[in-house]
Image: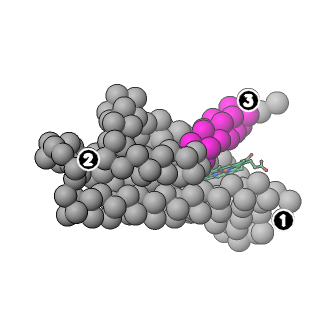
Amino acid sequence: MDLLVIGLRLVHIVSGVAWVGGAALFFFYIEPTVTALGPDGEKVIDELVGRRKVPIYFAVASTLTVLGGAILYWRDSGGLQLSWITSSSGLFFTIGGIAALIAWLGGNLLIPKTIGELGGVGAEIKAAGGPPSPELMGRMHAVQEKLRRIGLVDLVLLTVAVVTMAAARYI
Ligand code: HEM
């Protein structure tokens, strides 16, 4: 029984589930809810980001997934042996690993920044009082659209990672 590998696999897979599940929930439900609420969506953003620190959840889950995966990758590839990397299983783990790494970078840098921009425009609307001006609404829609596009790319990359990792051993 290899307790180290079992532990690494547990960390890798459990945090991967938390990361990908959270990203899907955010993309399919939370972000559309915030958009539908218009200027009131700022309250949801405030609660989720300011008080409940959702970006920390994603930072911890994604970083544990990537760290666990990187150690497993190093072990499985015998210290990055090309013969393993270029085997069909190795290629699948490599493609999934690269997709997840890009999602990790983009998700942790771009998504919190864009959510911050959304909160900023929401705060401006609140400070201006009354119905929001067309200029402010235009900015709000532009940031919402940007967040949706980043979320979509993130989810596509994560889906590539899940599918390739799940199939790699049996390819
Ligand atoms: C969204 C991100 C990821 C998800 C959901 C994910 C999911 C999984 C799953 C379900 C397995 C088990 C597959 C099996 O045993 O047949 C696995 C294994 C593996 N993953 Fe990932 N993974 C992710 C990211 C990464 C990254 C970034 C790397 C490397 C840098 C990586 C490297 C590996 C390796 C080497 C294994 C084989 C572990 C072993 O020897 O048991 N993964 N992954």
Mark 3 lies on residue: 3
Residue farthest to the left, as pictured = 128
Q: x%, y% of residue 48? A: 40, 35
Q: Is residue 78 above or below residue 4?
A: below
Q: Quadrant of the N terminus?
A: top right
Mark 1 lies on residue: 171
Q: Nearer the viewer, residue 135 or 86?
A: 135
Q: Residues within 10 Å of mark 1 (few under 14, many from 20)?
A: few
Q: Is residue 98 left or right of residue 145?
A: right
Q: Which mark is residue 25?
A: none
Q: Quadrant of the C terminus?
A: bottom right
Which residue type carries mark 2? Gly
Q: Quadrant of residue 114?
A: bottom left
Q: In the rendered structure, which segment of residues is drawn in magenta?
A: 4-23
Q: Which mark is residue 122?
A: 2
Sequence-wise, the earlier of marks 2 and 1 is 2
Sequence-wise, the earlier of marks 3 and 1 is 3
Q: x%, y% of residue 5? A: 71, 37
Q: Is residue 71 visible?
A: no
